[in-house]
Image (cartoon, rainbow, N blue to C red):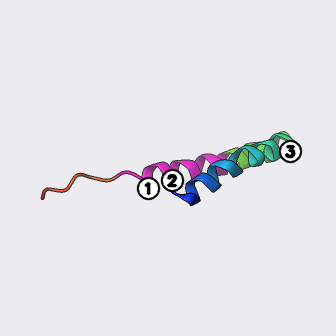
Amino acid sequence: MNTDDVDNDAALVPRLRVIEEQPLDQRATAYAQVHDELKARLEGGDVSPSDG
């Protein structure tokens, strides 16, 4: 985990609090965006083994 990961993790909780205060339709859109960002981050960490 690098410094950027720690910063992103620390920013997640306040971001979720802001989302929770929004009207339902806006919350759904915001949560979908968070989901997509987290999914991309997790899938981007996948490394296939080398044949070396």
| Marks 3, 2: nearer the viewer | 2
Q: Could you tell me residue 44's position as x and y percent?
A: 43, 55
Residue to which mark 1 is pinned: 44
Please state if 52 lies on the left or on the right of 34 as rendered: left
Q: Nearer the viewer, residue 2 or 29?
A: 2
Question: How much space separates mark 3 and mark 2, taking CA atoms?
Answer: 25 Å
Q: The residue tagged with tag 1: helix, strand or loop?
A: helix
Magenta extent: 32-46
Residue tagged 3: 22
Query: What is the three-letter code of the residue carrying label 1?
Result: Gly
Residue 49 pos. (x, y %) = 22, 52
Please give the count of numbered marks on the rendered protein: 3
Between discs 3 and 2, the one toward the N terminus: 3
Label 2 sits on residue:
41
Badge 2: residue crowd in 10 Å (few <14, some 14–19, many ≥20):
few
**Residue toward you, 5 or 48:** 5
